[in-house]
C-alpha cells in the first residue's frame, strides 16, 4: 500500500465519511468508508493490483468499476467470488484475492505469464490427449488450476426469500433516460418500478458530469420529480438479471430474487464502455475512462496521478477535463480521429493545457517492474487505413491510460426479450430495429448519447409504454436524435509481441482470435467456444464488440453480417443462493402419519407422499424388518396405510358407460356391491394405470388408481367427460378419505367386532364392496387381495381415519397385528406374481406383453386404446413379462431391478422386480424377456453390478397360493 | 349418521398443533379447534401483525351435480351467479360458486347450514339424485395482519394487492393448490386458504417459516371468532 488517493469531499460522492470501515486485504489492514466498494476503498489506499488474471496470472486492477472487473474477485470467510468493483466494503471483512497460490503479491502461478507463448487458446484440446494414458493426470492438473474461487463446504446455507411482484411498467436503468421514462409513464398513470444495479440512481449523471456543470443539477431535478410520484418506485442495488416470456423479469437485490411480472418494459440500461486493444492494455493503471470517472466522482478517489487519455469521442475529452478539474496532470489526449473532437470540448481541453495528439493511437503500454502498473505509453500515428506507423512512435510518460474509444449498448436483455437489432454503420453500434409488443428502449442502448436527447428519448419511451397500456398520452410523442457517434470502428492494434488483450476474463489475446480464425473457427459462435471469449464472468460485455470487429475484418465482412453471440440470462452472474431461494418441496401426509412416525417408520417418497417403506425395529436390519412384516401378513395379520391411492367418485346416469370407455374392462354389468380390476391404456395401447372399480349404486362408482397417477387419471377423466359430453359428476376424493388394508388370516377376526357389516365370506365375498361403519365412523370396505391374503381395504373420511386405524391396531393386538410398509407390500405382491404398473411396465408396455390381456373386454363398442390394441394383437408379441427364480439354493450377490438380461453378449431383457421371498426362501422376480424365451423352464443370465452373470430360470406365476384360496377364506 | 357429529374427528394438522403448540381446544361440530396457542393478549397483537391460524374444523361441504343449485335454493341458500363468486353465509360463513354446478359452503362457528345440507344428502351422499356432496377434508388457514401480503408475495405468483372479498381465487401457494378468499373477521383483514388436507402440515410449516422472518407466528381461532 502507498499513500492515500482519497480526495477531499466532492459534490455528489457516494461515500459516508462519518462511517469509516476497517478490513484487511491479503492480511494487511485497510480502511474505507461506508458507501465504498471494495475496489474503491483499496484503490483509495493505494492498492493498484487487486487480482491476478485467470490464465496467465497477470496483475490486474480497477478497469470498469461497473461489475465487469472479474479479475478483482475476492473471498471473505466462507464466501467467495465477491465482485470487488461493485460490492460494498464490509467492516471487519478479511478479503483475499481468488485464483492465486501463495497470495496476490507472490502468486506462484505468475510464472504462467512467462510460458504464455506455449499456451495459446485450444492448447489443451491439442496437447493432453496424447498419450491417452496420461489424460487423467492432465485432467486433474487442469481442473485444479481452472476455475475461480473455492467452494467452502462450511458456508452456511442462506435461505433467501424469493418473491413475486407486479407493476405496469418496469424501467430497467435509472440513468437520465430511464428516470425520464419512469417519470413520463408514472405521470400518465402507470404504476412504475425503476430498477438500477448501482447503489444510487443517476447513471452517467452520477459520474460523467464534472465538465458539465449544468448537468449536475439535472439529476436532482429528475429525482425530485420521481419522488413526487407515489406510483413510481426506484429500486437501487437491483439487477435485472434475465428477461423471460410475457414480460417476466428476474430482479436480484441483496441476494434475493424477485419475479417481476410487468405489463410493459423500458430498457434504459445504457452502454458498456469498450477498451482499446494494445499491448499491455490489461495492466493496473489501464482502465476505461468511465471507470476512472466512477472512482473519481462516486468515491472521491484519484484514479491516476498523470494519465494519458486515449479516445475517439467527446467522452474522452470530458474525462480529461474531469481529471484536470481536481488537479490531476493529464499527460495528453490521444485521439484516434484524424480531425479530433468537433465540439467546443476541443477548445476547453486546450484551455486546460492538455496536449492533444490527433490521428494517433496507443501501440503499447510500458509496464513497471513486476507488471504492477505502467510508467509510459508508446503512441504511434494512424494512416488512412487505420494502421499504426510503428516506426514513428512517441513515448509519453504516464502512470495510467484512460480509454474512451467507444460503447456497446447494454442490450443483452433486449435480445432476450425478442428485440431485433441492426448494426448502424453511422454510429458503429447495434441499435434496436424491431421490438416485441410492450418492449421499449431508451438512451444509449438506443444509440442516443447526448444528455438532452437522452431525456427526450426516455420521455418518448415512457409515454409509449403508457400508450401501449391504454393510458392517456400525447398523440405526438417526442423524438430524440441518435448520436453523436461515440464509437471508433476499429480501436484494435496488433503487436508482434502479443499481450494485446481482447477478453480480460479469459486472457484471450488478439493473436488468439487471429489463430482461431485461421484454424477455421470463423463463425462468431464457434470462435466463442474455441477461444472462450465472452465465456468468463463478465459474459463478454467488454470483449464481444471488439471480437466481432476483429472477426469481421478477418472475414472481410461487415460487423452486422458477422453478428454477435447469443445473449442468455443472466446479465450478470447471480449468486446461487438467490437462484435457489427458499426451497418449496410440497409433500403430503396421510392422516396416519403421526402413527407411522411414532412407530419407527422409515419414509420413502411416492410422488409427493411420504409413505412408510418399512418400520424400523431396534437391533434389526432393514431386510429383517421387512421379512418380519411379510411374515405377519402371511401368518397373522398386518395393516398398511393405503390412503395414498388415488380415489375418484363417479356418479350420474352415464357413469357406467363412462368407465367402460376409460378402462379396458366391462363395468355396466358390474353388480352393486362388487368390485372389479380396472386397467387403463392410452390411445396407443400402452398400459398407464390400474386399480379397482367398485359399484356403490346404480349410477355411483368408486375407482382407485395407483398412488402416483391419481392426479393425472382424474385430469384425464375430466377431459374425456367433457370431450364425450357425458352426464356424470367426478370428484377427486384422494385426499378426502384415509385408507388402510387389513390383510392376513386373522383379518376378519380383527375387523368383525368393530363393524356393523357382516364380514363373513358368504355375506361379503372376495371382490365385494360394502358400506357401513368401522369403530362408529362411516366406511367403505373392499374385499381385494393385492398381497394374496384375506384382506379388507377400508376407506373412511380422512378426519376419522386415525381413529379407525387406531381402533384396528388396538383390536388386532390380540392377533399380533403389525403395520407393514411399501417394501413388504412389494414382496407380498411379488410372491403373488402381481405386476405394478410403472414398475413392471414401462412407457411402451401393452397389456399383451404384461400378461394383462385377460383384463381387456374387446366386445364393447369403444375404450381408450381399443383400436391400437386390436392392431397390436394381430402382430407377434416381441417381449413378455415373465416370472423367474434364481433357485432355492442361491446365496450369491443379488441382481437388482433394472439389471439386464444378457444373451451371447447382447441385451435381451431386464429385471423389473426382484426380492428374496421370505415365504418361499428363494430369490424370485419379474423380468421382460423376448417372447421366444418366455416359456417356463427357459434359463437365462442376468448381469449384475460387478459384471458377474447370475443364472435364472423362467417359472410359472404366481409363486404363492396359485389358486388364490387364501384370499377367499 | 351425519359427518358433523362423529367421534374422534381430527383436523389435518391436529397432531402438529398438539405437539408444537399445546393448544387450548374446544369442540366445534365434532372436531377440536384450537382456541389459543399462547397468551391471548399476545395472540391478538400477532393476528394484526402477521399470523397463521388453523380453522380446518369449520364445517364445510361441496355440492356437485345438476341438482345442487336446486337443492340449495330449496334450503334458502342464495349462491353467486358467477363462477368463483363468493358471498357471506350466515354470520361468519362463506358460500362460493366453484363451478357451473359446483358449490362450496362453509359455516362460521355458529352456522348450521352445512349441517342441514349434510343431513339431507347423507354420509356418503346418495340421498338426493343429481346432488353429489363431497366430504371435504380440507386444511383451512387464516393468514392475517400486515405481514400477510408479504407472505403471499413470497409464496404465490398471483397478486392479492387488490382485495376482492367477492371472488375466490384458485392458485398455488408454495407449490400447493389452494383456494383463497380475502375476508374480514373480528375487524381483522385476512386471507382464508383452503387446501387438500394431506398438504396441510407442509403448508402450515412453510407459511410459518416465512412468517417468522417478520416476527409473525401461529395463533388460535379465538382471535378471529371471539364467540368461540
Image (spheres, grey):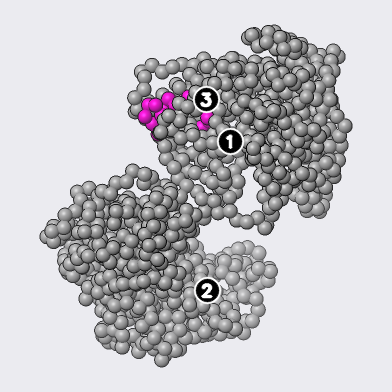
Q: Quadrant of residue A899?
A: bottom right
Predominant SS of the magenta segment: helix
Residues at badges 2 and 3 in contact (C-beta under 8 Å)? no
Percent x, y of residue A709 = 41, 62
| Disc with the residue nearer the chain's start (2 vs 3) | 3
**Disc 1 versus disc 3: nearer the observer:** 3
Q: Residue at x 36, y 19 (%)?
A: A474
Query: Is residue A812 shown to the viewer in this render?
Result: yes
Percent x, y of residue B117 = 18, 65
Q: Quadrant of the C terminus of chain A?
A: bottom left
Q: Is residue B162 above or below residue A954?
A: above
Q: Which residues are magenta?
A: A172-191
Q: Which mark is residue A537?
A: none
Q: Secondary structure at mark 2?
A: strand
The residue indicated by pointer 3 is: A220
User: What's the CA distance linking mark 1 and mark 3?
Assistant: 16 Å
The residue indicated by pointer 2 is: A602
Q: Is residue A187 magenta?
A: yes
**Disc 1 versus disc 2: nearer the observer:** 1
Q: Secondary structure at mark 1?
A: loop
Query: Horizontal placement of B128 versus B200: left or right?
Result: left
**Disc 2 versus disc 3: nearer the observer:** 3
Q: Is residue B123 magenta?
A: no
User: What's the CA distance linking mark 1 and mark 2?
Assistant: 50 Å
| Disc with the residue nearer the chain's start (1 vs 2) | 1
| Disc with the residue nearer the chain's start (1 vs 3) | 1
Chain of the residue where label 2 is placed in the rendered structure: A
The residue indicated by pointer 1 is: A199
Amino acid at each position: 500500500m502507498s499513500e492515500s488517493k482519497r480526495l477531499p469531499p466532492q459534490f455528489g460522492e457516494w461515500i459516508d465519511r462519518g462511517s469509516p470501515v476497517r478490513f484487511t486485504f491479503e492480511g494487511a489492514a485497510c480502511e474505507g468508508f461506508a458507501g465504498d466498494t471494495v475496489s474503491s476503498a483499496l484503490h483509495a489506499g493505494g492498492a493498484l493490483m487487486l487480482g491476478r488474471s485467470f490464465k496467465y496470472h497477470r496483475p490486474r486492477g480497477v478497469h470498469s468499476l461497473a461489475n465487469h472487473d472479474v479479475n478483482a474477485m475476492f473471498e471473505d470467510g466462507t464466501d467467495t467470488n465477491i465482485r470487488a468493483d461493485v460490492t460494498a466494503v464490509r467492516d471487519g471483512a478479511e478479503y483475499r484475492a481468488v485464483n492465486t497460490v501463495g497470495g496476490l503479491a507472490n502468486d506462484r502461478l505468475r510464472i504462467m505469464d512467462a510460458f504464455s507463448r506455449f499456451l495459446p487458446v485450444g492448447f489443451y484440446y491439442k496437447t493432453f490427449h496424447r498419450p491417452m494414458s496420461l489424460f487423467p493426470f492432465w485432467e486433474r492438473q487442469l481442473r485444479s488450476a481452472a476455475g475461480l474461487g473455492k467452494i467452502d463446504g462450511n458456508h452456511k446455507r442462506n435461505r433467501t426469500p424469493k418473491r413475486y411482484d407486479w407493476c405496469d411498467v418496469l424501467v430497467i436503468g435509472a440513468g437520465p433516460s430511464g428516470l425520464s421514462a419512469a417519470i413520463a409513464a408514472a405521470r400518465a398513470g402507470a404504476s412504475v418500478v425503476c430498477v438500477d444495479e448501482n447503489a444510487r440512481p443517476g447513471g452517467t449523471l452520477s459520474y460523467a458530469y464534472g465538465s458539465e456543470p449544468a448537468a449536475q443539477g439535472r439529476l436532482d431535478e429528475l429525482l425530485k420529480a420521481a419522488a413526487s410520484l407515489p406510483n413510481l418506485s426506484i429500486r437501487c442495488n437491483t439487477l435485472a438479471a434475465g428477461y423471460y416470456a410475457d414480460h417476466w423479469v428476474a430482479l436480484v437485490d441483496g441476494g434475493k430474487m424477485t419475479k417481476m411480472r410487468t405489463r410493459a418494459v423500458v430498457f434504459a440500461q445504457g452502454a458498456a464502455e469498450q477498451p482499446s486493444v494494445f499491448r499491455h492494455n490489461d495492466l493496473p493503471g489501464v482502465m476505461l475512462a468511465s471507470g476512472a470517472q466512477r472512482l473519481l466522482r462516486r468515491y472521491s478517489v484519484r484514479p491516476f496521478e498523470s494519465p494519458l487519455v486515449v479516445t475517439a469521442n467527446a467522452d474522452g475529452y470530458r474525462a480529461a477535463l474531469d481529471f484536470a478539474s481536481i488537479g490531476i496532470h493529464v499527460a495528453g489526449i490521444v485521439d484516434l480521429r484524424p480531425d479530433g473532437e468537433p465540439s467546443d470540448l476541443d477548445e476547453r481541453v486546450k484551455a486546460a493545457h492538455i496536449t492533444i495528439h490527433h490521428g494517433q493511437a496507443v501501440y503499447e503500454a510500458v509496464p513497471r517492474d513486476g507488471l504492477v502498473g505502467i510508467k509510459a505509453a508508446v503512441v504511434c500515428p494512424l494512416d488512412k487505413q487505420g494502421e499504426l506507423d510503428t516506426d514513428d512512435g512517441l513515448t509519453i510518460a504516464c502512470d495510467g491510460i484512460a480509454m474512451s474509444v467507444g460503447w456497446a449498448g447494454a442490450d443483452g436483455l433486449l435480445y432476450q426479450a425478442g428485440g431485433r437489432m441492426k448494426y448502424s454503420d453511422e454510429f458503429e453500434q447495434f441499435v434496436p430495429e424491431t421490438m416485441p409488443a410492450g418492449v421499449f428502449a431508451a438512451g444509449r442502448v438506443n444509440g442516443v448519447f447526448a444528455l438532452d436527447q437522452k431525456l427526450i428519448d426516455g420521455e418518448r419511451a415512457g409515454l409509449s409504454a403508457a400508450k401501449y397500456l391504454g393510458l392517456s398520452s400525447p398523440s405526438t410523442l417526442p423524438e430524440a436524435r441518435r448520436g453523436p457517434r461515440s464509437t471508433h470502428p476499429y480501436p484494435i492494434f496488433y503487436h508482434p509481441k502479443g499481450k494485446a488483450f481482447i477478453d480480460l476474463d479469459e486472457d484471450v489475446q488478439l493473436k488468439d482470435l487471429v489463430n482461431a480464425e485461421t484454424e477455421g473457427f470463423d463463425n462468431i459462435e464457434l470462435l466463442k467456444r474455441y477461444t472462450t471469449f465472452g465465456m468468463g464472468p463478465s459474459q463478454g460485455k467488454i470483449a464481444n464488440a471488439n471480437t466481432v470487429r476483429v472477426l469481421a475484418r478477418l472475414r472481410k465482412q461487415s460487423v452486422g453480417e458477422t453478428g454477435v453471440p447469443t445473449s442468455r440470462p443472466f446479465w450478470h452472474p447471480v449468486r446461487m443462493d438467490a437462484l435457489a431461494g427458499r426451497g418449496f418441496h410440497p409433500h403430503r401426509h396421510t392422516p396416519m402419519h403421526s402413527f407411522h412416525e411414532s412407530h419407527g417408520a422409515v419414509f420413502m417418497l411416492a410422488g409427493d407422499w411420504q409413505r412408510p417403506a418399512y418400520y424400523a425395529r431396534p437391533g434389526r436390519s432393514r431386510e429383517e424388518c421387512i421379512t418380519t412384516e411379510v411374515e405377519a401378513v402371511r401368518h397373522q395379520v398386518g395393516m398398511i396405510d393405503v390412503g395414498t391411492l388415488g380415489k375418484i367418485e363417479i356418479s350420474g346416469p352415464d357413469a357406467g358407460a363412462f368407465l367402460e370407455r376409460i378402462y379396458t374392462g366391462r363395468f355396466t354389468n358390474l353388480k352393486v356391491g362388487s368390485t372389479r380390476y380396472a386397467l387403463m391404456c392410452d390411445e396407443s395401447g400402452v398400459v398407464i394405470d390400474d386399480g379397482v372399480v367398485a359399484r356403490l349404486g346404480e349410477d355411483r362408482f368408486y375407482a382407485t388408481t395407483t398412488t402416483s397417477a391419481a392426479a393425472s387419471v382424474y385430469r384425464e377423466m375430466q377431459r374425456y367427460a367433457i370431450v364425450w359430453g357425458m352426464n356424470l359428476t367426478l370428484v377427486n376424493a384422494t385426499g378426502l378419505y384415509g385408507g388402510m388394508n387389513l390383510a392376513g388370516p386373522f383379518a376378519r377376526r380383527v375387523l368383525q367386532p368393530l363393524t356393523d357389516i357382516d364380514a363373513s365370506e358368504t355375506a361379503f365375498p372376495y371382490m365385494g364392496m360394502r358400506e357401513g361403519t368401522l369403530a362408529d365412523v362411516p366406511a367403505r370396505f373392499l374385499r381385494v387381495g393385492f398381497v394374496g391374503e384375506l384382506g379388507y381395504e377400508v376407506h373412511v373420511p380422512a378426519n376419522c381415519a386415525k381413529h379407525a386405524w387406531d381402533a384396528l391396531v388396538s383390536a388386532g393386538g390380540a392377533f399380533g397385528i403389525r403395520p407393514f410398509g411399501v417394501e413388504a407390500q412389494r414382496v407380498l405382491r411379488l410372491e403373488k406374481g402381481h405386476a405394478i404398473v410403472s414398475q413392471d411396465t414401462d412407457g411402451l408396455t401393452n397389456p399383451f406383453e404384461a400378461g394383462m390381456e385377460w383384463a381387456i373386454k374387446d366386445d364393447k363398442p369403444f375404450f381408450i386404446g381399443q383400436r391400437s390394441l386390436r392392431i397390436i394383437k394381430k402382430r407377434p408379441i416381441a417381449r413378455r413379462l415373465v416370472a423367474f427364480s434364481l433357485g432355492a439354493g442361491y446365496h450369491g450377490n443379488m441382481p437388482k431391478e433394472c439389471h439386464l438380461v444378457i444373451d451371447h453378449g447382447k441385451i435381451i431383457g431386464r429385471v423389473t422386480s426382484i426380492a428374496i421371498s421370505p415365504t418361499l426362501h428363494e430369490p424370485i422376480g419379474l423380468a421382460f424377456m423376448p417372447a421366444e424365451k418366455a416359456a417356463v423352464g427357459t434359463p437365462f443370465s442376468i448381469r449384475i453390478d460387478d459384471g458377474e452373470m447370475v443364472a435364472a430360470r423362467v417359472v410359472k406365476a404366481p409363486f404363492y397360493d396359485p389358486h388364490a384360496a387364501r384370499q377367499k377364506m | 349418521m351425519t359427518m358433523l357429529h362423529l367421534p374422534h374427528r381430527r383436523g389435518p394438522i391436529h397432531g402438529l398443533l398438539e405437539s408444537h403448540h399445546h393448544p387450548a381446544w374446544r369442540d366445534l361440530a365434532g372436531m377440536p379447534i384450537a382456541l389459543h396457542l399462547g397468551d391471548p393478549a399476545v395472540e391478538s397483537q400477532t393476528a394484526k401483525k402477521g399470523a397463521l391460524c388453523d380453522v380446518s374444523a369449520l364445517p364445510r361441504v361441496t355440492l356437485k351435480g345438476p341438482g345442487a343449485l336446486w337443492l340449495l335454493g330449496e334450503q334458502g341458500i342464495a349462491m353467486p351467479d358467477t363462477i368463483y363468486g363468493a358471498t357471506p353465509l350466515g354470520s361468519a360463513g362463506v358460500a362460493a360458486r366453484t363451478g357451473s354446478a359446483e358449490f362450496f359452503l362453509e359455516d362460521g362457528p355458529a352456522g348450521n347450514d352445512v349441517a342441514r345440507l349434510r343431513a339431507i344428502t347423507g354420509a356418503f351422499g346418495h340421498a338426493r339424485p343429481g346432488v353429489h356432496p363431497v366430504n371435504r377434508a380440507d386444511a383451512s388457514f387464516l393468514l392475517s395482519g400486515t405481514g400477510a401480503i408479504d407472505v403471499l408475495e413470497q409464496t404465490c405468483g398471483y397478486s392479492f394487492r387488490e382485495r376482492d372479498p367477492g371472488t375466490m381465487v384458485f392458485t398455488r401457494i408454495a407449490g400447493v393448490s389452494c383456494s383463497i378468499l380475502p375476508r374480514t373477521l373480528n375487524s381483522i383483514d385476512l386471507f382464508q386458504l383452503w387446501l387438500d388436507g394431506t398438504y396441510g402440515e407442509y403448508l402450515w410449516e412453510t407459511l410459518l417459516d416465512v412468517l417468522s422472518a417478520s416476527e409473525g407466528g401461529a395463533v388460535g381461532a379465538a382471535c378471529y371468532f371471539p364467540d368461540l
